[in-house]
């Protein structure tokens, strides 16, 4: 019999969304946080730029809303954008109360205020940041708070395999309502499958950028929450909008190191290998254009020139300014032999953010009772066809608070813990095909980059779908016959997410925001969100 754990609230994911939610709920509930790797392995820890909110007296919520709507290319949910912008400052103030130390500076009268930077798509300086390591400051602060709370348990190195759901009679007409009652989880320490019952389950698993060969994301960003929710019966939306960050450091030893958009916000210039500037030729906002425009411009110039990379140059700023505002980037690039105070940094675009996801309402609720989704895994309508810089961590905070309020009101005190069905692995064996799983993993990420990347065509999408369908057949055979492993579980989820991305992309017969196709280069008159349900595939 598999071991079973019980809790009031199960949070799958240990980034800003999951940790914030746990802290909001723990005074009234027993909470378990499931972390696939170590608690700091997720995307939040690596976020450099900052969090957007109106703190400047010359700025306004209306301006934040307007900038977000423009970046979203007509596909944002205006009500959600308004709600997020209105709640931004209070959520940032809550984060400050938790102990996050954002950068400050004296104003003209000598009073200390928060230093606000500006990033692409923003018309004002409204980005609170902790130097160039905001995510690290947020993550470590929240982890410290969680670790000191006696009603929160963190399960590190646990994969969520699948959600456990059951149907209840809803009314006399025998309609069925599906309820989530927990999950099957794989303990990577003991290599055993376990079960966890929860009155409320929240997906806070982040995005799916690991589906691409080149990404700024850590290894854990494998679309687990989207895939699990889809298999359970949830709808997904706008999965075709995959944001490619324009400026990942291009160096064989750099890994997935990102060069924050705040560099361009503080005056960094994009240059060709010959030193000439090119962004003004693509957009009047130049380096401060939204990310989709900047990424396509870099991609275009690389292909036109046959160049391996473009260059980001902030060396015209003083050494003191660069070291003060970008200490992490300065140390990292210097360790690779690049002195950013004297020379430009080589950059390429890389998959960075999943704008679509599991459909939720304003309280974070999915199509399944007692199942919520918050953060990058969710589709709220905030980002539309293109996420504006520094709205992502903000979305985590705002919707963690909203979900917490709803969960607190609806957390049944009388509901008893129940035994979940046992996990049956009596007929599975150890796999000697791990090398094949690795080959499939690399094949998937390569053809997604080639066929479903920054620039797409119908023929490329059809080729990608054909390959995904072949991979799904192989993976299903592995999954049924061999014991689970981290690589198998992530591959299974990534292939599922790849299929959803491709189907969404094939349905959009236009170029809008992050979805650019040579077959339909113009905007359509019809502005429509792409929604997929299990009946569509």
Image: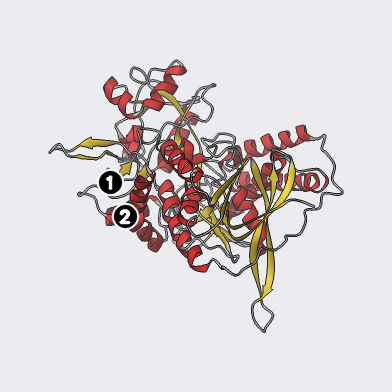
Q: Residue at x 41, y 35 (%)?
A: 48
Label 2 neighbour load within 10 Å: few <14, some 14-19, many 20+: some
Give the image location of residue 365, x and y in percent: 53, 63
The answer to whether residue 500 of the structure is visible from this angle is: no
For label 1, the SS is: loop
Dot label at residue 123: 1
Mark 1 closeness class: few <14, some 14–19, many ≥20 residues within 10 Å:
some
**Mark sitting on residue 515:** none
Residue visible at 45% across and 28% down in the picture: 347
Q: Nearer the viewer, residue 178 or 379?
A: 178
**How are the residues colored?**
secondary structure
* Image location (x, y in percent) of residue 73: 40, 53
Q: Quadrant of the C terminus?
A: bottom right
Left or right side of 525 for 164: right
Farthest residue, direction front: 150
| View extreme (bottom): residue | 172
Quick check: 40 above or below 479?
A: above
- The mark nearer the N terminus, 1 or 2, is 2
Report the residue that reaches farthest toward the left. 109
Q: Are marks 1 and 2 in contact (CB under 8 Å)?
A: yes
Q: Is residue 506 left or right of residue 409?
A: right
Q: Is residue 118 visible?
A: yes
Image-quadrant location for residue 62: bottom left
Residue 304 locus on image (x, y percent): 47, 30
In the rendered image, residue 265, in percent from the top left (x then y), is placed at 31, 36
Tell me which corner region of the image, top left, top right, bottom left or bottom right, holds residue 113: top left
User: Which residue lies at the image location 35% right of the left edge and 57% below the top edge?
Assistant: 87
Q: CA distance from mark 1 to mark 2?
A: 9 Å
**Residue ID at (68%, 42%):** 491
Residue placed under numbered mark 2 in the picture:
66
């Amino acid at each position: 019999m598999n071991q079973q754990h019980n809790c009031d609230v199960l949070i799958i994911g240990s980034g800003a969304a999951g940790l914030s939610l746990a802290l909001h709920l723990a005074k009234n509930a027993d909470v378990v946080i499931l972390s696939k790797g170590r608690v700091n392995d997720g995307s939040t820890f690596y976020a450099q730029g900052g969090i957007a909110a109106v703190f400047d007296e010359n700025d306004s919520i209306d301006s934040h809303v307007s900038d977000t709507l423009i970046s979203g290319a007509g596909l944002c949910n205006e009500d959600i954008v308004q709600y997020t912008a209105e709640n931004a400052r209070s959520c940032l103030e809550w984060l400050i109360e938790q102990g996050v130390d954002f950068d400050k500076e004296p104003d003209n009268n000598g009073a200390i205020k928060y230093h606000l930077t500006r990033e692409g798509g923003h018309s004002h300086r409204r980005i609170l940041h902790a130097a160039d390591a905001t995510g690290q400051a947020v993550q470590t602060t929240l982890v410290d708070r969680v670790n000191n709370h006696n009603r929160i348990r963190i399960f590190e190195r646990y994969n969520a395999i699948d959600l456990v759901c059951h149907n209840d009679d809803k009314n006399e007409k025998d309609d069925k309502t599906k309820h989530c009652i927990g999950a099957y989880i794989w303990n990577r320490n003991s290599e055993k499958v376990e079960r966890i019952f929860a009155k409320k389950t929240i997906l806070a698993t982040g995005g799916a950028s690991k589906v691409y060969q080149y990404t700024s994301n850590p290894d854990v960003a494998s679309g687990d929450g989207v895939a699990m929710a889809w298999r359970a019966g949830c709808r997904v939306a706008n999965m075709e909008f995959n944001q490619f960050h324009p400026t990942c450091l291009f160096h064989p030893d750099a890994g997935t190191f990102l060069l924050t958009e705040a560099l361009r916000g503080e005056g960094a210039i994009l240059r060709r290998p010959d030193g000439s500037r090119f962004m003004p030729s693509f957009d009047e906002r130049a380096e401060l254009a939204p990310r989709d425009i900047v990424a396509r411009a870099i991609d275009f110039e690389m292909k036109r020139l046959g160049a391996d990379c473009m260059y980001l140059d902030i060396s015209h700023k003083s050494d003191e300014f660069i070291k003060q505002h970008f200490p992490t980037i300065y140390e990292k690039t210097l360790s690779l032999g690049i002195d950013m105070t004297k020379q430009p940094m080589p950059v390429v675009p890389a998959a960075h953010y999943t704008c679509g996801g599991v459909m939720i309402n304003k309280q974070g609720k999915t199509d399944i009772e007692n199942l919520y989704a918050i953060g990058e895994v969710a589709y709220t309508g905030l980002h539309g066809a293109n996420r504006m810089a520094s709205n992502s961590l903000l979305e985590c905070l705002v919707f963690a608070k909203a979900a917490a309020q709803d969960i607190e009101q609806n957390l049944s005190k009388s509901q008893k813990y129940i035994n979940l069905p046992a996990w049956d692995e009596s007929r599975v064996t150890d796999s000697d095909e791990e090398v094949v799983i690795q080959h499939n993993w690399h094949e998937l990420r390569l053809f997604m980059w080639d066929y479903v990347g920054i620039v797409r065509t119908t023929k490329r999408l059809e080729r990608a779908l054909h390959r995904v369908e072949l991979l799904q057949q192989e993976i299903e055979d592995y999954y049924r016959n061999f014991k689970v492993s981290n690589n198998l579980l992530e591959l299974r989820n990534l292939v599922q997410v790849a299929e959803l991305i491709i189907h969404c992309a094939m349905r959009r017969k236009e170029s809008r925001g992050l979805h650019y196709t040579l077959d339909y280069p113009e905007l359509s008159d019809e502005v429509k969100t792409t929604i997929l349900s299990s009946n569509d595939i």
